[in-house]
Image (cartoon, grey):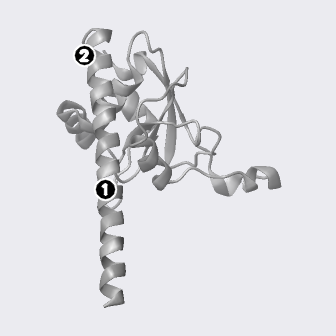
Amino acid sequence: MKLGDIIDIKVGLNSSRLTTDDARQQTGYTYDDLQVDLGSGISDQVNLELVTSLVGSQTSAIISATNRAKVLNQNFARINMDATIIDPYYLCYLLNESHDIMRQKETLKQGSTLPKITPQIIKELQVSLPPIEQQQKIGRIYYLANQQYQLMQQNAHQQHQAMMRIINTI
């Protein structure tokens, strides 16, 4: 089935076209927010939404409660789905890691200098879904592994900083 049969996708706003001062003062969603969301672990929110980068890495993540109110620009899209058909964490796994999806994206994406994928391309991606229980297991393992990876990176960064402080005192 096509992914467009089971998801709804909306592109963020063109920030140069925002007209009100209030809209311009809202906090925008960034690539750093996307990386934090990808490593934030399992959420207890209901009605989970994904955000996907349409340019560059084309990474997808569950939007955290902290970032949910941030304004997405045209480089991001928000994806909604029926969690009884496709598990949100499994969808992140598919969009980020599935070799079949990556192959389809490579074939369909636009641009050579800065690769871009459109919402229409995402909707056209062909997926075959395992039973929802299996999706949930795969999705949770994937998200917990990302959380562990991010924690390990933070720990390594802190150890490096501590080492540099010691070296600088010598």
| Residue named by callout 2 | 128
Up-down: is 126 above or below 32? Answer: above
Tell me which amino acid carries mark 1: Gln
Query: Closer to the N terminus: mark 1 or mark 2?
Result: 2
| Residue at 55 percent of width and 48 percent of height | 74
Question: How many numbered tags mark residues here?
Answer: 2
| Residue at 32 percent of width and 10 percent of height | 132
| Residue at 58 percent of width and 49 percent of height | 73
Spot occupied by residue 164 in the image (x, y as percentages of width and height): 32, 79
Q: Tell me where residue 117 sits by quadrant.
A: top left
Is 128 in front, or is 164?
164
Q: Quadrant of the C terminus?
A: bottom left
**Secondary structure beneath label 2:** loop
Q: CA distance from mark 1 to mark 2?
A: 33 Å
Is 135 in front, or is 159?
159
| Residue at 32 percent of width and 26 percent of height | 140
Q: Is residue 14 visible?
A: yes
Up-down: is 9 above or below 115? Answer: above
- Residue farthest toward the right in the current orientation of the protein: 21
Spot occupied by residue 16 in the image (x, y as percentages of width and height): 66, 57
| Residue named by callout 1 | 153
Is 124 in front, or is 130?
130
Q: Is residue 108 visible?
A: no
Q: Quadrant of the N terminus?
A: top left
